[in-house]
Amino acid sequence: KAGVTQTPRYLIKTRGQQVTLSCSPISGHRSVSWYQQTPGQGLQFLFEYFSETQRNKGNFPGRFSGRQFSNSRSEMNVSTLELGDSALYLCASSIGQSNEQFFGPGTRLTVL
Amino acid sequence: AQKITQTQPGMFVQEKEAVTLDCTYDTSDPSYGLFWYKQPSSGEMIFLIYQGSYDQQNATEGRYSLNFQKARKSANLVISASQLGDSAMYFCAMRVDTGANSKLTFGKGITLSVRP
């Protein structure tokens, strides 16, 4: 079974731009969660989607948004990028909302 | 609120020896799950082991075992017979089972270096 895939793997943007990251969960997994990882703040929860509905949200500004499609694929969008948004963005999928989460390789975003 | 604490500085272990990575947690919820993940330099988070708060026995997965002490709120990871490929960051995480909730709260992580 293929694992969680994330595209792109690396991304360089400039301040003020917007970016869209994509995550394809493991086949059969309906829950997708997003996390931001930075050296200073560690791993922080962004949001979680289940059956196309956002079920949980972390403490991030409204510039961070996401959605989930009917095939469980998910996208997250960051608008008006700031230097502090430079991070590794990890997506994780699980069968349901209370099962082990399996992570993708991440998208490393650099904001210049 | 949930909190995971990993305070060990970088850990070093000789190849083939065992090592314990510490994790303490704090939650007032009676139902929760504890996870350990490994993150090599490539960045991917690899799921290692899971312990439920009501599990009577400590979880084991191959060379990984979880020393779960509920009263002390600790969930230490024990890696037996360390291998060079075990060198990575290790994260302890917790999920509280309040209805539909997949949010994982992570600790800061511990760097493990295995020496040949």
Image (cartoon, helix red, strand yellow):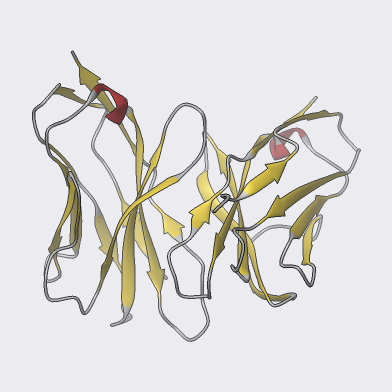
Residue A1 in picture, x, y percent from top left: 54, 54
Return the residue nearer the eye: B6 or A27: A27
Residue located at (60% from left, 68% from top) = A28
Which quarter of the rendered picture does the N terminus of chain B lie within?
bottom left
Q: Please tell me whether residue B93 is drawn above or below residue B89 in the rendered image.
A: below
Return the residue nearer the eye: B48 or A44: B48
Residue B46 in picture, x, y percent from top left: 42, 45
User: Is B73 positioned to the left or the right of B44 in the image?
Assistant: left
Which quarter of the rendered picture does the C terminus of chain B lie within?
top left
User: Is B79 positioned to the left or the right of A50 in the image?
Assistant: left
The outermost residue toward the right is A17
The outermost residue toward the top is B116
User: Is A96 positioned to the left or the right of A66 in the image?
Assistant: left
Q: Please tell me whether residue B45 is drawn above or below residue A56 in the rendered image.
A: above
The outermost residue toward the left is B17
Q: Please tell me whether residue B65 is drawn above or below residue B31 in the rendered image.
A: above
Q: Is residue A11 visible?
A: yes
Return the residue nearer the eye: B23 or A101: A101
Residue A63 in picture, x, y percent from top left: 81, 55
Residue located at (42% from left, 31% from top) = B40
Q: Quadrant of residue A107?
A: top right
Q: Is residue A58 visible?
A: no
Residue B112 in picture, x, y percent from top left: 27, 29
